[in-house]
Image (cartoon, rainbow, N blue to C red):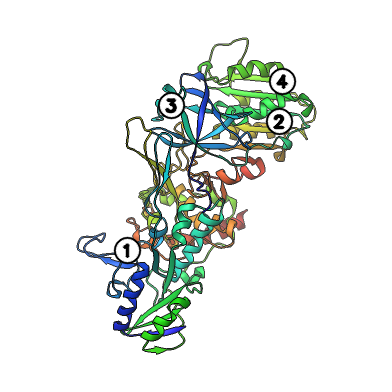
Amino acid sequence: MGYCFTKDAMEAIWSEWEKCYDIYTPKCYHGKGRFSDTDCIRYGQVHSIDEVVFDKKAEYSPKEFLLQNAETLFYFTENHIQESEKRQKEALIFLRSCDLHAIKRLDAIYLQQGAADNYYKRLREKAKFVLMGCQKAFDTCFCTDMGTNQSQDYDMSIDYVDGLYFMDCKMAQWDELLNGAAKSIQTVIPTYVTETITHITLPKHIPQSMLQSDFWRQYDGRCIACGRCNFVCPTCSCFTMQDMYYTDNGKAGERRRVWASCMVDGYADVAGGGTYRKKNGERMRYKVLHKIWDFQKRTGYPMCVGCGRCDDICPEYISFSHCINELEKACKEAEVNE
Amino acid sequence: MNENVYVPFLSKILNVIPHTPIEYTFRMQYQGEVKPGQFFEVSMPKYGEAPISVSGIGDGFIDLTIRQVGKVTNEIFEHYEGNSLYLRGPYGNGFDVADYEGNEIVIVAGGTGVSPVRGVISYLGEHPQRHKGLTLIAGFKSDDDILFRDDFEKWMTQMNVILTVDKGEPSQHRHVGLVTAFIPQLDMKCISTAKAIVVGPPAMMRFATAALIERGFQEENIWISHERKMCCGLGKCGHCRINDKYVCLDGPVFPYTVGKNLID
Ligand code: SF4
Ligand code: SF4
Ligand code: FES
């Protein structure tokens, strides 16, 4: 059912929602930006519709809700294990179409590949998604080329246009409240972009020779292996186990998992001192090919959703989208030569 | 609520066999299905979880050969008696003896790479009717690094064993030289059907598989096993991924025809 609301009505709805949900949306952290006197837009719990940032892209993605950057799995003693507590309240998460498509990717890894992950699952079951319409693409977005610019599988949608809020609601439980509060009842199709400034062409085939091609060498020196591109990515989902010990003998403590980055030193270290992908260019290859090739081989669709966050964040101005376009050309050449 | 796949279970340390000053085999209480080549995530006090491959399987126990590396706890090496460790697993595909049975078989293993194939070697050693000739080429850095000495003594009575060290004085019971040096002179009855398993450090596997192919082995008759940093064993943490394969789910054992195309 579609509705149009004034700001006052939206506020009333919000307070009803908050009885049932914790609400997470992109919000502004003043003065917390990457450069002095800049703001940072990232996910956080908000308490009023005014706090929701509609006109800027969140630097970090909503994956922060489902995969926290440090999550306690359980507490242990010498002979007892106590699982960490699970969230009680449901959560309402506001996100854009690309990010909703990213959730599908996380589900593929955390729920469908191998055994289901209990910690992901228990949060995922508590999450409801509110699709935020996109009236215009940001500079680095390339969702249209990835087929992620439009979404159907949301619980509710919201568009903020000229001081009014437009919503489509698929949750019957809210119909009565929304009906009563609406300025008008109308068909609402969440806005989505059909034009982007940045474009990419995915390679149709990646010849085996590209895995060891000099193409990747350009990143050996340019990339500083900081891992920011992974941390902001809505589909990057690697972690490392970490134990925290409360006792000297290491027999009581807690086990956590923390975000890991395949661009950062240590990711591929094995016991005994061996490691893989020492060069940053090799790591770039590993990341890029996972996003547009390797994941797809398992699932049938690419991992990257074209949000452009990795391009926005890189301190060395390394562009993922540019890399894909150059790679596409290089792959064609390699195929001719093969 | 379904069982939490991250929660380990307690397993009692039944026995400890020291091999070298830094490598011990822990015999752990365990009931359940498990295959050689599979691995467990072992919680080591003060260190955290580490993937350890199963080096032996028996009635009510599994063997885990653990190497004390870097900051890996001295604790479990020193205070093991009567203790327990947290384990979860088994993970990975493991070796399927049916893949090799009934043929001439060559197993090439380097260093701790002997652990994952130890179960296969022992099984084939004890069932001579299940193969048409068995050769084990096992290489260690030096005499001090040799693992499973008791096993080697028994294996020498059951199969053709070429035990070698990279560096050392000549001796009667073992050779000096890299494992690859012994591949060209392998005496095979039917090279086109002979099967080979190669496990060890990456460079050793690369050279050994190349030497086997050079010797006339068919690519599809070779299997390899990969070692990676496996944090979860569940296809989630990402550390073990090579191209579109997860070593913890799709491996660690790969047919060479698949493994040869995996580029880290
Ligand atoms: S790889 Fe870059 S563009 Fe693609 S989903 Fe991740 S952050 Fe977004
Ligand atoms: S953000 Fe840029 S410099 Fe940092 S790891 Fe990613 S590509 Fe390299
Ligand atoms: S060990 Fe974590 S994905 Fe394989």
Name the residue carrying label 2.
B215
Mark 4 nearby-residue class (10 Å; few <14, some 14–19, many ≥20): some
Dot 2 amino acid type? Arg
Is the same chain shared between marks 4 and 1? no
Task: Give the quarter of the image for residue A269.
Answer: top left
Task: Note whether ligand 1 is within 8 Å of mark 1.
Answer: no
Label 2: element kind: helix
Residue at (38, 33) in percent of width and height: A251
Mark 3 nearby-residue class (10 Å; few <14, some 14–19, many ≥20): some
Q: Whole-percent x and y of residue B70?
A: 40, 29
Label 4: element kind: loop
Name the residue carrying label 3.
B76
| Residue at the extreme left | A37
In front: mark 4 or mark 2?
Answer: 4
Dot 3 amino acid type? Ile
Q: Whole-percent x and y of residue A89?
A: 38, 63
Task: Give the quarter of the image for residue B252.
Answer: top right
